[in-house]
Image (cartoon, helix red, strand yellow):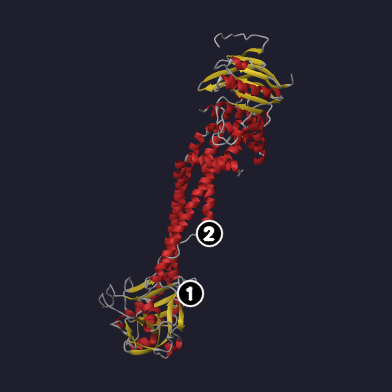
Amino acid sequence: MGKSIIKVNQLHKSYQMGTNSLHVLKGIDMDIREGEMVSIMGSSGSGKSTLLNIIGILDNYDKGEYYLNDILIQKMNEKKAAQFRNKYIGFIFQSFNLISFKNAIENVALPLYYQGVPRKKRNQMALEYLDRLGLKDWAEHTPAELSGGQKQRIAIARALISKPKVILADEPTGALDTQTSYEVMDILKEVNKSGITVIIVTHEHDISEMTHRVIRLTDGLIGSNIKNGIHQPTITITNN
Amino acid sequence: MFDIDSWQEIINAIKKNKLRSIMTAFGVFWAIFMLVIMYGSGNGLKNGITEGIKDFATNSGFMWAEKTTKPFEGFKRGRYWEITNKDITEISDQIKDIDVISPRLNGWNLQKGENVVRGIRSAAFNVMGDYPSYRKIDPCTMPWGRYINDEDIKFKRKVCIIGEKVYEVMFDKDEDPVGKYIRVNGVYFMVVGVFKSNNPNINIGTNKKETVYLPFTSMQQTFNYGDEVHFFGITAKPGIKMNDIINKIKPILQKNHKLAPDDETAIGKVDIENEIKGMFYTFLGLDIVIFFVGIFTLIAGAIGISNIMLIIIKERTKEIGIQRAIGAKPLTIISQILAESVFLTTIAGFIGLAFGTMILSLVDMFIDKAHANATGDEPTFFLNPEIGLPLALTALSLLIIVGLIAGLIPALKAVKIKPIEALRHE
């Protein structure tokens, strides 16, 4: 296993709800190494989305430390955060979050647009990525004309095009049927094999079982951290 | 910044809210349209009026005799009196601030039936008696011949100059009138020139186009006016106020004719300097009104644009969130929203500008046509409604600034939304 790509020490995060403070993350320690494929599980309210947002620099934390590629990520201005996101992280969302009026190729090329890559070059690169995901023929179609699986593959292509170190997938299969879910997971495994760290937030066991490691959050703390195939999870859910 | 993607964003944002965009853009369109129309009309009015008086001596005045309204030194009120040659001599001798003094006769009693005859042609025209100096008060051009000169006055020559209309009626088109005779109330006068006033809008005592002008002295003698002066024009030396001169003339006339010093209406007067000053303030007031109405309409339009931008951003919160999650910098988002706002404002404003200018040029065309067909007797009060290129350019840059300001609040609001909140927004 390679060097540490995401390292979190004693991470705390609470939200202010009027006068009440909701303590969501209560001291998370986590170390994800380069090239790993990790799933984060937990019931709703366990803090897994908050953790993912902090890792994705979409949100900041209150206490502790977070190192991304050995760089300490602290409270930073939005411009810098945007640059970090663009450089290190590719996002995949449950609801795909494609831009509806742009066609597939423009959606995929969008991160490069923000990097200032010329249109011709970025569209050519986008086409390559679409080709790799078997969507070359759909390049000119808008999201509304595509199926869920196709949309998610476009989203993956978009996440990959900026050559990130880490892919953060928030319930990537949540809106897909089993068949398509497995196809998407196969793609993510391929991505992982190319050396990119993949972190998947999911509540589906069959999905988490395809990853190297399952991190389970319980009430804002790491409940278990188990390498797949060696240990059984501490909390067993019988009716899956 | 302005590549295909930026334009795509702009066009899409507008297309998504077609009706609302059009309604909002209409506000700006209307503001600019109104500004152009108002400004152009204001200019037209100004042009029309100043064109009609452009050469008239602005530091001039006129005085004449009126019925007395107060008894004085045994005279009853309601007495008629006459200015005389002696008064004029005294005034010009005693008051050194006067540049030009020009006594005039108005032959209103000569205008009975068709008083002007040439061969088989005859018509009714006014007859005036003038000094050469009158040309300094009301400048004119002479399409034919010359103006009345000092020799005419000295030798009381029986010559005359005629207005354009008189020439038109009494002579053939392009016929040289100089040296020809016309009969004015039974007396033959030789035409020495045709008179075309530079100030057709100022007519004092007579319509200048329909008047025969005789040398003052010839007219006094020929038509038995004795030493009467019906009224006189004066101009002040540079830096002297016309009103001061009028106030110095009054005592002379009051003394010579036994008028009550406190009889304000016994001496008729018009102070052109004052009239023009009043007109200047009227124009200034007009400009200010136009400016404020225009600016406030424009502000209302800008608020409309700002409003719709806020709505667009609210609807696109999620999209903005996605863009920021995949690496759009806040500046990218801000410039995108500003570009949208400026685009909408500029397009709307430009159409307003074009439409307004079109209307103005149509009006201009219509006026020109009306002028060509007019008999030429009515004075012009509306001419060349137009806005200059500087104003057009100012308006356009103003629009861009307005667009920027209108987009600023929504843009800042858009970047304040954290990407995470935007993504959660369903």
Between the residue at mark 2 and the residue at mark 1, the CA separation in whole angstroms equals 38 Å
Which amino acid type is marked by label 1? Lys
- Would residue B250 be seen by someone viewing this image from the given angle? no
Q: Secondary structure at mark 2?
A: helix
The residue nearer to you, when weighing B38 against A104, is: A104
Residue drawn at x 74%, y 21% as measured from the top left:
A3
Look at the numbered discs 2 and 1 and tell me whether their residues touch, using CB distance below 8 Å: no
For label 1, count other residues whose C-alpha is less than 10 Å away and answer few (under 14), some (14-19) or many (20+): some
**Same chain letter for marks 2 and 1:** yes
Question: What residue is disc 2 on?
Answer: B389
Question: What residue is disc 1 on?
Answer: B237
- Would residue A3 be seen by someone viewing this image from the given angle? yes
Which amino acid type is marked by label 2? Leu
Q: The C terminus of chain A lies in which quarter of the figure?
A: top right
Q: Quadrant of residue A121?
A: top right
Q: Residue furthest right?
A: A2
Q: Secondary structure at mark 1?
A: loop
Would residue B126 appear left or right of B9 to someone viewing this image? left
Q: Quadrant of residue B178?
A: bottom left
Residue B211 location (% of width, % of height): 37, 80
Precedes in sequence: disc 2 or disc 1? 1
Q: The N terminus of chain A lies in which quarter of the figure?
A: top right
For label 2, count other residues whose C-alpha is less than 10 Å away and answer few (under 14), some (14-19) or many (20+): few
